[in-house]
Structure formats: C-alpha cells, structure tokens
Amino acid sequence: QLQASGGGTVQAGGSLRLSCLASGRTFGRYGWFRQDPGKEREFVAAITRSNGYTKYAESVKGRFTISRDNAKNTVYLQMNSLEPEDTAIYYCAADLTYALTSRLRDYDYWGQGTQVTVSS
C-alpha cells in the first residue's frame, strides 16, 4: 500500500527526491524514517494529509522538505545539501489518524524502503 522510490547514490552536497505512492486507503498522516545498518530507525519528517502541517528532525531542518500531492496520493521528500551522514535506507510510513507525530509506533503502514547513499 506504500511504494517508495527515488533512492540512489549521490555525492555530498547533491540532491535527491524520494516519492511514496499510497494506495488502498486514505491516510491521515505520512512520515519518512531512515535506518542505517546497526542503528535504530529514526524519524526524518512528517506531514498531515489534510492541511499539510509538517515536522522535521533537527538534523534535516533547512535541508529536507516533505510535501504531498493528494490528487496523486503521493508524498515526497526533497533532500538537498546531502551529507554522508544521511546515508541510510529511507522508509515511507502512513497512518489513518491525523495528528502530526514523529513516533514510529504511531504509524501502522510501512513501505519497503529505498536506499540513499551519499559519498564524500
């Protein structure tokens, strides 16, 4: 029900845009999380479907932008000024409720993940 795409390999300072296509139901909120091998999955950004309110992790503020296109049932994560520390598998998540949240346990639906690698 969530299909993430857009990952790849980029040099430090470069940009990538991730997409997450949602299907099967109408979600209230979307989130992007990331996980490096051996580390816990961490919050990156979230957005509400109805009014577009957003929330970001401190580490990506000013560099990443989350947005949504309700007509296309798609959520995006525009990532600029990428750093090697941003290297991870990025996961799209969604939930039926509407409150903006950064907690993993508040998201019931998860996509398969897309790899982002930033070389120095």
Image (tube, helix red, strand yellow):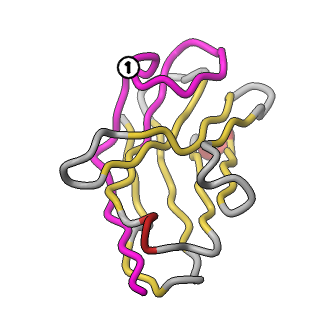
- Left or right side of 27 for 99: right
Q: How many marks?
A: 1
Query: Magenta includes 95?
Result: yes
Name the residue located 32 percent from the left edge and 49 percent from the top edge: 35
User: Where is residue 117 drawn, in percent x and y?
Assistant: 36, 73
Q: State whether residue 74 is above or below residue 28.
A: below
- Left or right side of 61 for 43: left
Name the residue located 37 percent from the left edge and 19 percent from the top edge: 108
- From the image, tell me which residue sits under label 1: 108
Q: State whether residue 16 is above or below residue 59.
A: below
Name the residue located 80 percent from the left edge and 28 percent from the top edge: 51
Query: Magenta includes 103?
Result: yes
User: Where is residue 23 drawn, in percent x and y?
Assistant: 44, 35
User: Where is residue 54 drawn, in percent x and y?
Assistant: 73, 36
Q: State whether residue 113 is above or below residue 14.
A: above
Q: Which residues are magenta?
A: 92-120
Q: Nearer the viewer, residue 78 or 25?
A: 78
Task: Report the quarter where the N terminus lies.
Answer: top left
User: Where is residue 77 drawn, in percent x and y?
Assistant: 59, 55
Res 30 quadrant in image: top right
Q: State whether residue 14 is above or below residue 82.
A: below
Disc 1: CA contacts within 10 A as few (<14), some (14-19) or many (>=20): few
- Left or right side of 87 for 81: right
Task: Report the quarter where the C terminus lies.
Answer: bottom left
Identity of the amino acid at label 1?
Asp
